[in-house]
Amino acid sequence: MSDDRPEQNIDALLAEDRTFPPSDEFKRDALVTDTDLYDEAARDDEAFWATQAAELVHWDREWDTILDWQLPYAKWFVGGQLNASYNCLDRHVEAGNGDKVALHWEGEPGDTRKITYTELCTEVQRFSNALKALGVAKGDVVNIYLPMIPEAAVAMLACARIGAPHSVVFGGFSSQSLADRIIDAKAKVLITADGGYRRGEVFPLKPAADEAVAASDTIEHVVVVRRSENDVEMVDGRDHWYHELIEAADPECPPEPMDSEDLLFLLYTSGTTGKPKGIMHSTGGYMTQTTFTHKYVFDLHPDTDVYWCTADVGWVTGHSYIVYGPMSNGATQVMYEGVPNHPGNDRFWDIVEKYKVTILYTAPTAIRTFMKWGPEEPAKHDLSSLRLLGTVGEPINPEAWMWYHTHIGGERCPIVDTWWQTETGAIMISPLPGATTTKPGSATFPIPGVSGEIIDDEGRTVDQGGGYLTLTRPWPAMTRGIWGDPERFVETYWARFPDRYFAGDGARVDSDGYFWVMGRIDDVMNVSGHRISTSEVESALVSHPAVAEAAVVGANDPMTGQAIIAYVITRGTAQVEVKVLREHVATQIGSIAKPKTIYFTPDLPKTRSGKIMRRLLRDVAEGRNLGDTTTLADASVVDELAKRASEAPAEE
Ligand code: WTA
C-alpha cells in the first residue's frame, strides 16, 4: 500500500460499496419489480419452469413429465413436442405480427437490409426445402461457417425446422479448426459464404471451407452465400449458390414436430485438453430458458424495444441471444457484420443512434476498448434511446462498469451483468433489472429457478468469501452432454464435487449474498471473452517443426482480460521468428488464439515429477515476485525466465 495517494485507496473502498437500485422511472414499466418469481421458483423449481414453458413456448404436444433427473443427465418436458423455428417465426406471423421487423441488418461497408418476420419465415422455409433437396434429413448434422449476415440466422432456423442439428463454427476460425469440427460431428452439408467484410476489407471464407472439406470425408454438399463477391471456385455437383437454391425452392415447408429432448444443435467449445468439446443442446428446455431469460433479464417490451446483441453467431451468445431467445420473443433487433472501429471508433454509437437501440448487450472487452478510445466517441451521438445495458463473457471490472453506466447509459440505464456458459445454454446468474440492486462488477444472484452455490475445497458451502462456483439443481437449458464423449462430460463437470455441476469458475460471495465471478480456475484462458485452452495453443505451437516444447499461460491483461503468453523451447539449434510462430497458431486455430508474447527459453520450470509449473509461468508473465520454488527440479530455470521477461518487453 502506498502512502502518497491515500485518496486512491478511499476511492477504491467506496467503489466496492456502491450500489445501484433500479430507478422509479425504470420500475414504472418493468416486467418484474418484486420477488414474486424468485419466491415461486423457490417453492417448487420444476413447477416454476413448467409454468414458463407453457406460457412462453408453443408446444405441438404437451409433455408427460416435467423433469427426469438422473444425475448428470436431465431430460426436461419429456414427451412434449415442439419446433424451434415455428416458435421463432410462424407463431409471430400467425399472431398478426408478420410485418414487424425481425432484423435491421447493417453490413460493415454501410449497406443495410430490413427483414420482417414474414420475410424471414418464407426464406427459412425455402432454405429448409433446399436442404431437404440436398438430402438433409432429420438427425443429420449441418455445419455452418458464415460471417454475421442474416443468412446465418436463416441457416440455423432452417436446420431447426427440419430437425437437422446445426454446428456453427465461428467465421474467424481456421480451416484446420473447421475440419476438426466437421470430422467430429460427421457433418453432411456445409453452409458457407464467398467471404465477409472486416475492417474495410473482404476476408475470404470459401478457400478455408474448401480446405476443411478436403480434410474431412463426410461433407456431400456445400452451400455458398454470395456476400462479398470475391472470386471463388465452385466444385461441380458439390457446391451450390445459396441464392440459386432459394430461387428454385418451394416457399412452404411445414415445421417438423421435434421431441423436447431431440438435439437442436452442437456447439464446440474449448476445454482443458486440446480437443474441443461438442456441447449438445436439446430443444424444449433450451427454448424455454432462452425465451424466459431474454424476456425477463432484458425486460423485453417486444412492441417498442430495439435490441442489439453484438456477439457473433459463432458463439453461444449469438445462438441464445441473437437467434433463439429474441426471435422466440418476437423481438426487433439489430445485427451488425463488422468491427467496432470501421470506418471510425464511433461505429457502435452511430448504429445505436441510427436504429434507436433501446437494449444493448455486449462484452467487457469491448467496453474496455471503448474506454481506451475515450468518451468523446459516444458523445458524438444521441444515445438517449438506450434504456438497458448488458454484459457477458468475462468478469467486468468495476471501473469499466462505471464507464459503461456513465458514458453509454447516461447514468439512467440499469446494467445486467450476466454469467453463463456454452454448457449452461442460457443466462444463470444476473440481475433482473427492475428488481435487483446492482453492484459494479457483480453478476448479483442466480435467476429464479437456478440454484447456484459457492463451495470450498471440501465441498462446504461458503456464506461469505471465495470458492468454486457450482450449480446444485438441473436447469432446463443445461447441456445434454459432450458429443461422442460421455466420460469426458462426467469427468469435466461432475467429478470434482459429488452431486453438483462444477462450472470451472472461481467466485466470491459477499456479506449481502452477492456473487462475484472471478474467472476460470482451470487451464482455460478467457481472451476477450472467448474461451481458449492452454493445451490447444501448446499443440499448435509444437506442430511447428522448429518447436520442441511449449507452455502457455493466460496472464492478466488490461484490454483483453487475459492475454496468451507462450514459453517456447526450440528444437536443437532451430531458429524461428516470433512473428512466424504467431502466424502458425493463427493458421492452426485462428487469429484469436495468437499468443500476445512468446518467450524463447532453454528450459521450462517443472516439478520433480515433470509437471510444468504454470503458476510460476503466470507469476513471471504478470511480473510478480516468485513465491515458493523449492518444489522445482531446477530452480535456476525460473530466474533465467524472469530475467528474460524483464529484458524483453511484450512483443505485439
Ligand atoms: C466467463 C459465454 C464473469 C466464465 C456466455 C464462464 C463470465 C465462461 C461472465 C463461459 C460474467 C461469462 N462474469 N465471467 N458475467 N460470463 N463468463 O462458454 O469464465 O464462451 O465460465 O459462454 O465465460 O464462456 P462461454
Image: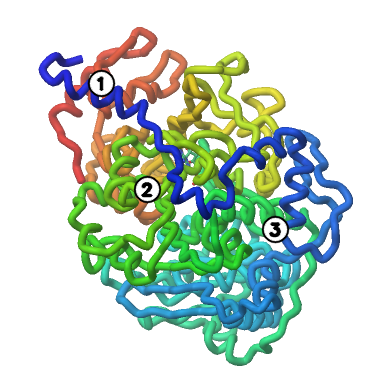
Q: Quadrant of the N terminus?
A: top left
The answer to whether 366 appears left or right of 455 in the picture is: left
- Front label number (3 vs 1): 3
State the separation of the CA atoms marked 2 and 3. Answer: 39 Å
Find numbered disc 1 in the image and state the secondary structure of the residue it sits on. loop
Amino acid type assigned to the residue bearing label 1 in the image: Arg
Give, as a three-letter code, the residue at label 2.
Answer: Ala
Location of residue 58 by image quarter: bottom right
Secondary structure found at label 2: helix
Up-down relation of residue 606 to residue 153 (above or below) = above
* Circle 2/circle 3 CB separation < 8 Å: no
Task: Please name the amino acid that badge 3 sits on.
Answer: Leu
**Number of the label disc, if any, that sits on residue 624:** 1
Query: Which one is nearer the viewer's eye here, 120 or 405?
Result: 405
**Nearer to the camera, 622 or 34:** 34
- Circle 3 SS class: helix
- Looking at mark 3, is its residue's CB closer than 8 Å to ligand 1? no
Which residue corresponds to the image point at 42% horizontal and 71% vertical from the top-left?
207
Which residue is drawn at the image coordinates 35% and 80% (left, top)?
111
> Circle 3 is placed at which residue position?
56
Residue linked to disc 2: 593
The answer to which of 247 and 102 lies nearer the viewer is 102
- Per the rendering, the mark at residue 43 is none
Residue 491 shown left or right of residue 612 in the figure: right
Residue 617, position as x, y percentages in the image: 32, 25
